[in-house]
Amino acid sequence: MRTKLIEKPSSRSPKDIDIDNMCSDVEVLEYECPCGKGKIVEEHDYTPGFREHDVNILCNSCSKKYTLDLKKGVRNWELIEK
Ligand SMILES: [Zn+2]
């Protein structure tokens, strides 16, 4: 099961963007969780020497009820009921 991608407002000031670019190059995608109280966060870190691709359920009730199936890769995660 896939959930809806949360569109993030691009309201950051140029100052914030400069600081982020100096530290790392991280892509973060946020999705709604099944109950709607929390979210699912997919992170892709492209910082040289520190490449990390991860996805987590940031919701107390959904993290107990569901697990993430990453057999097809982090970008193709599927929520499955435990
Ligand atoms: Zn939830």
Image (spheres, rainbow, N blue to C red):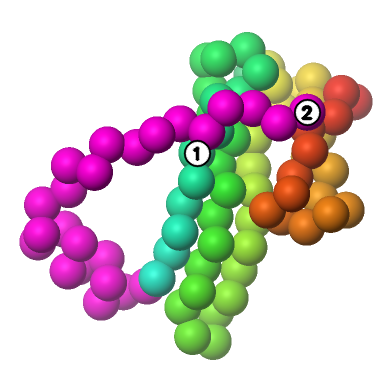
**Which residue is farthest bottom?**
49
Residue 38 included in the magenta stretch of the image:
no
Which dot, 2 or 1, sits closer to the camera? 2
Quadrant, the C terminus: top right
- Asked whether 60 or 82 is in front, the reply is 82
Q: Residue at x 25, y 77 (%)?
A: 22
Query: Where 67 sits versus 12, above or below?
Result: above
Q: Residue at x 85, y 29 (%)?
A: 80
Tag 1: Cα neighbours inside 10 Å, few (<14), some, or many (≥20)? some
The residue type indicated by label 1 comes to Glu
Q: Residue at x 84, y 43 (%)?
A: 69
Note whether residue 60 is visible.
Answer: no
Q: Position of residue 59 (x, y in %)?
A: 60, 25
The residue pinned by badge 2 equals 1
Q: Position of residue 12 (x, y in %)?
A: 17, 48
- Asked whether 8 or 33 is in front, the reply is 8
